Amino acid sequence: MAKPNYAFAKRQRDLAKKQKKEEKKLRKTVPATEGGEGAGEPADQAEPGEQTGADTAGQAGQAGQV
């Protein structure tokens, strides 16, 4: 059985911690520059070209009435 490589595991943990810290730093700076409205777009908005559930349900009902 191979023995565990503790140095590699420690390096991976340190890299993950550093990345997480950078992401947190970016999240804190982005809302401050946007006027404090949040970290991004609201979750209920659809991307252009995408249909929400209500839109597809309405079109499905109209498809049979040709």
Image (cartoon, rainbow, N blue to C red):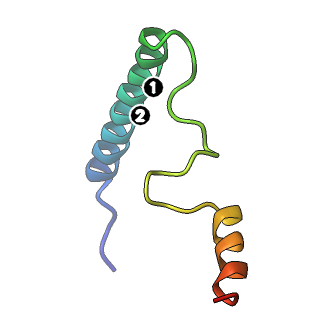
| Residue type pointed to by label 2 | Lys
Asked whether, in this view, residue 4 is left or right of residue 55, the answer is: left
Quick one: 13 or 30, which is closer to the camera?
30
User: In which quadrant of the rendered image does the N terminus lie?
Assistant: bottom left
Disc 2: which residue: 20
Q: Mark 2 touching mark 1, by CB under 8 A?
A: yes
Task: Give me the residue at 49% from left, 61% from top.
Answer: 50
Asked whether, in this view, residue 17 is left or right of residue 8, the answer is: right
Seen in the picture, residue 38 relative to 64 is either above or below; the reply is above
The image shows residue 20 at horizontal and vertical percentages of 41, 34
Label number found at residue 5: none
Quick one: 33 or 49, which is closer to the camera?
49
Asked whether, in this view, residue 66 is left or right of residue 9, the answer is: right
10 Å crowding of disc 2: few (<14), some (14-19), many (20+): few
| Residue type pointed to by label 1 | Lys
Disc 1: which residue: 24
Task: Give me the residue at 63% from left, 89% from top.
Answer: 66
Quick one: 60 or 26, which is closer to the camera?
60
Secondary structure, mark 1, is helix
The image shows residue 33 at horizontal and vertical percentages of 42, 10
Q: Quadrant of residue 38?
A: top right
